[in-house]
Image (tube, helix red, strand yellow):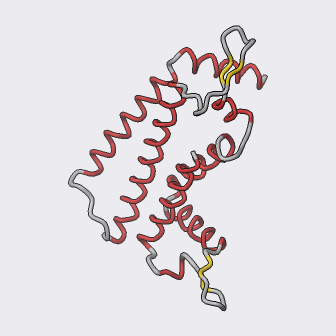
Amino acid sequence: MMNLRQVLEAGAAAAFAIANPEPKHFAKTDQNGFIDPAQDLTKKRYDWLALHFPEASDAIKEKKLLINNFAAHANIVVTAQTFEVNDAGDEISTPFFDVEDEHHVKTDLWETASISIVLMDLLYGVNKTRGVLEFIPDFEFHLRRVYEQNVALLTEMKSTQRYKQALARSQKASE
């Protein structure tokens, strides 16, 4: 998930760079000649993105927030990936590698694809203003098909008993 957060940040910066390629938008040089990737420049890039591509900006913010809330920092939720409890609940084991839950692997792969779709669409849209990147013929058609497949996979994941039970527990807890 930390890698995906880096991808989101780099994708946002890349989109901005297509329209604003000047180095001054990405780093400052201090009095000693050291490069400083100043946070105020990052904020300006995100402000530009929100102004010119609000839908993509919102999607990036939402995905970063999700990663920040659940996966970027140690917490009880992600800790469950490092140990197993047997069905009786009386034995805990800690395997050397993280526990691989097939459902979580699939949802992580889906999220990776979802982020890729958002960024490809954003880069394509920004490039329309500059024409500095070359996309395959019928890119929009292919991206639309991938998006539709991604939506179908999400629908399939949401139809599982596991998802429905988690949703019911969540709704009950919020009452």
Residue 98: image location, x then y, percent: 59, 33
Q: Is residue 95 left or right of residue 129?
A: right
Residue 7: image location, x then y, percent: 50, 54
Can you say which quadrant of the picture contains the C terminus? Answer: top right
Q: Nearer the viewer, residue 57 or 110?
A: 110
Residue 67: image location, x then y, percent: 62, 45
Residue 17: image location, x then y, percent: 45, 71
Residue at 56% of width from left, 61% of height from top?
50
Residue at 46% of width from left, 36% of height from top?
110
Q: Nearer the viewer, residue 157 or 1?
A: 1
Residue at 67% of width from left, 40% of height from top?
70
Residue at 51% of width from left, 52% of height from top?
55
Question: Is 159 situated above or below 9?
Answer: above
Q: Nearer the viewer, residue 84 or 14?
A: 84
Question: Is 120 situated above or below 158?
Answer: below
Question: Is 163 situated above or below 64?
Answer: above
Q: Is residue 127 left or right of residue 23?
A: left
Question: Which residue lies most toward the front here?
Answer: 96
Q: Is residue 95 left or right of residue 137?
A: right
